[in-house]
Amino acid sequence: METQRLAEAEAAVRAIGARKALPTLVSLVKTRDTPIRAWTIEKAERYRLGFPGLRSALDCQLQGIAGFEVLGTNCAAAVGELTKLLDDKELDFVAVRCLDSIGKAAEGALLQCLTNKNWQVRQRSVAALASATDDVEVYVNRIRPLLNDVEPGVRFATVEAIGYQTEAPELAVPLLTSVLHDSDDGVASRAAGGLSGFGTNALSAFSTLTNLVIAGRDGQCRAALKALAVISPVRALPILSNAVVNGRPPTMGTALKELKSIAPELALKMTLAELRSADAGRRPIALNVAGTYAVETPGIAEALKFAATDPDPEIARQALRTMRQMLQKQREKAGLNVRIPNEPVYQGKTLGEWLAMRKEGWELSTNALTALRQMGTNVVPALLARLTYKDPVFNLDDYEVSMEAATALMVLGDQAKPALPTLAALIDRENRDVALRAMIATLGAGADAIPCLMKGLTNRFADVRGEAAHFLTEWGAQFPEQRKQAIPYVARLLNDPDEHVRMGATNDLKELDPQAAAHAGIKWDRLPR
């Protein structure tokens, strides 16, 4: 709808035409916020007074700019008015945005913008002038002085504009090469990136880029490595491999990624070696690169599983995240659907296909619910297998498959009661994630779930104990008699070694048994969970 409304508005502005619209558009872009206007708008917004037609100066200016963008070159008659605004520090940037839309007719005004006192005007005019200048050499010569502008943002825009002139390497390459030593890493990196766009036509910059790899700042070094790999892959090969072996960790990571595109076997070998580096600063960088490979790449799975046992806990966690991300990427790319042996089929679709039919979050679609109930108790063994499913590559719990199974068992209600003994055992197992999802799976079984949830109160993991108490308190409220047996166990959690469990148990015990809570010395002010 928004796209349609926008198209209709643009058509209407064009139908009105520049001759009739320009006076209003110029008036809009010249709007200022006087003290009285600003005060009135502020009060109107605060008290929701809703004065019709009263808009802030910024809103008016943006509407005016939008009108110039729609009418484009037809707004040439407004160049004179807009040029006058370039000397107004409140309206100069608004003026250059309007001039940007006019094109060739605004060439003279945009040329003035290159020396405007406002650096944002200078920055905007660099790209705007490109569409107003017919000759590439003229354009480059006009903007090249801004390579020395005091503002990094202006220099960046200029470097970017020169980098686009790929049809004139003889003009652009020397200028981009000269900027490689800019004091701002962003500008220098953009210059290196710009050189990449010229491919072999930027060979004259090869030695300068090589020197940056050796002696440049980290940002310059990494940008130079990327450019070298594009400009001359063969000549860049020894430079990249040396940067992997001898470079600082960030440099090593960039070199590995670039090496992967030109010498994949060597890059893989070096990545696997760095994953086992004695330097704890290099292993995380190698992990980032390893995550860019496909799951089935020889050696990657074994190396990542080894990294998951790293003595540095953060590296071990990063390895686990990397493996999960790779599996998710593989699933999205291939549209893989996990299928459990001997799982039931209904109306030609497997259980996994039905479970994938969800609304928002984990809520199953109406058709999926119907299919599950039609399959009945026959589906329970397959759902329990999915609840504890591990991927065959990394042997990791699959959260999505497991959570789908937990949701399905919960919505099956009484039909899932045969699963309760197995779920109780899973809650008692030394796997926190499976225990949490097994508790969720019991919730459809009504009062029969209470004994299962009580298993969680003595689990070795703090968050399992906390969630079990919470389920018994909130969800179990519909079974007040049955949940009474949990009260002594929740009371013991008041002395739990985990602070969050103790705080949660304080609130839970108040709701379960106010008298027991008072006897334990708990005040009635509710603590944050």
Image: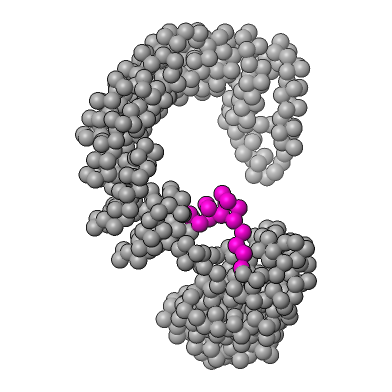
Q: Is residue 363 visible?
A: no
Place of residue 435 in the rendered image (x, y in percent of width and height, measured from the top left):
54, 76
Secondary structure mostly seen in the magenta stretch: helix
> Looking at the picture, does residue 456 appear above or below residue 391?
below
| Residue situated in front as seen by the camera: 55 or 486 | 486
Q: Which residues are magenta?
A: 325-340
**Quarter of the image where the N terminus is located:** top right
Residue placed most toward the observer, 175 or 105 = 175
Residue at 26% in and 36% down: 239
Q: Residue at x 38, y 60 (%)?
A: 302
Way the structure is coloured: one colour
Q: Is residue 101 above or below residue 340?
A: above
Residue at the (41%, 19%) spot, across then down? 162
Considering only vertical position in the picture, is 471 above or below 289?
Answer: below
Q: Report x, y in % for residue 8.
A: 76, 27
Dividing the picture into quadrants, the one containing residue 225 is top left
Q: Is residue 196 magenta?
A: no
**Res 27 → quadrant:** top right
Q: Is residue 368 left or right of residue 336?
A: right
In the image, 105 versus 352, the foreground residue is 352
- Whole-percent x and y of residue 138? 43, 8
Image quadrant assignment for residue 55: top right
Instruction: Name the residue at 72% across, 78% down.
Output: 377
